[in-house]
Image (spheres, rainbow, N blue to C red):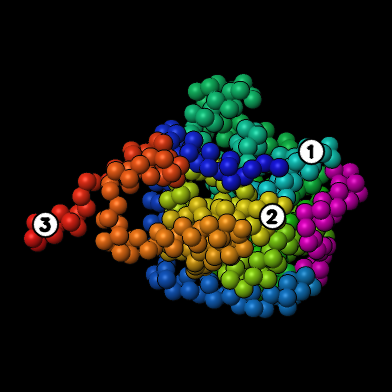
Amino acid sequence: MENKPKIFHAKSEEVAFDREHRRILKYNIGQYDKAVEKGRNFFRDMDNVREQASKIKEYVLQEFEPLLVRFEKNARGNGCEVQWAAEAADVYKIIAKIIASEDVRTVVKMKSMISEELEINHFLHKHKVESFETDLGEFIVQLAGEKPYHIVTPAMHKSKEDVAALFHQKYNMDPGSKPEEITAFVRNFLREKFMSAQMGITGANFLVAETGSVALTENEGNGMMTFSWPKTLVVIAGIERLVPELADLDLFWPLLAVHGTGQHVTAYNTILSGPAKSTEGDGPARMVVILYDGGRTRLFQDQDMVPALKCIRCGACLNACPVYKNIGGHTYQTTYTGPIGSVISRYMDTSQDMGFLNFASSLCGKCTDVCPVKIPLHKLLLANRHKIVESSDSVGVERFFFNNYKKYMMRRRRLERINPKWKNKAMTTIGIKVWGPRRDPLVFAKESFHLTWKKKGF
Ligand code: SF4
């Protein structure tokens, strides 16, 4: 098995010192910050809006079972087939059956992080089904053979030159192609796939319990093609995606748009309530909704972590995080990255211990400040750290180290009794491993500021 913490440290160091990577990230997050600042003006009282959204999500978590059952009942009433899946294997079984019964050879996919969790493309490939990501950013990362870099903007790490080079390599386009030319090419390429695909796959931004509807939001219209053209539509939805009523979208859609991209509202917003009726010309003949757990109930079982289930996957905490901005998305090696990814990954995928990610935070609290549903992310990171340290074998060693550290840091005289030469020696032998060889060495002054101050008689 891969040593994920080791890879994480090595990659962090590599990426943090990659100037070009930092330039691209800084530019893209800078553009996002400007747009969000404007977008937030859409709300007269943003804090109140966040509070309301948080309360609705808290209500959902309190009434979780009845709301899920209500959604299921209403979705069935709309003509959907509703299936429950505890783990990835259950989803694969359901999809394999549909592939066989509908003779599926081509799938078009709308951007969805849940399908990344499940590595659906890989699964389809194994079943000899070709699948196409239809969101431009997702299309680019699929073409590059990569995973999404960010939960909202999957190709955020690529410059327009990188993308042009990729399309030159894969489709022999002019290496100097402009973004509009590349977009037009992808549009034409996908048009034919939309028309020939037997199945579409989407996630769900929200599941409306009141009406049994799936609410989807997107900017490119690719989603609408995904669920309008193919005969069969499969929606894979995380069970936490619930909102109680249709009217709640009035709050959540603009909130998600503002925090995701800075728009007041996303370009295309769709409420899907079952397959096409006999009087409707467009839409799938068959609609299957898979309600997927995939570790969400593990979060539920840990009382401290329940607030993490309020997440609406807007990506704002990633863009605000100083660690994410330095090490980038791929370094995390998880589907969900940044602060929210660090909190939930150890619960979502227990095949690897991803707990170490909770230590990749300065705990500055910026993630908590920007979260539209008021998840106290820095507190959750800290709570996870406590749990990990308490259950760790190294707890004895850590306690010894930190007790002594505290003893010396709290008593100035003790600290000053150590000769700076020895302090420097300790830093260049033991401390260098933590401090890293790329930083300027830490050199202790011959005399502390406190002593100098005292000698001068201030
Ligand atoms: S934790 Fe909050 S800020 Fe981060 S993605 Fe979820 S909703 Fe957005």
Which-is-in-front pick, marks 1 and 2? 2
Residue drawn 48% across and 74% down? 51
Secondary structure beneath disc 3?
helix
Residue drawn 38% across and 40% down? 428
Question: How many angstroms separate mark 2 from mark 3 (CA)?
Answer: 58 Å
The image quadrant of residue 60 is: bottom right
Please provide the residue range marked out in magenta. Answer: 75-104
Q: Quadrant of the N terminus?
A: top right
Residue drawn 82% across and 56% down? 90
**Residue matched to label 2:** 349
Residue drawn 79% across and 73% down? 73
Which numbered marker is on residue 231? none
**Residue matched to label 1:** 125
Question: How many angstroms separate mark 1 from mark 2 (CA)?
Answer: 22 Å
| N-terminal label among 3 and 1 | 1
**Residue matched to label 3:** 455
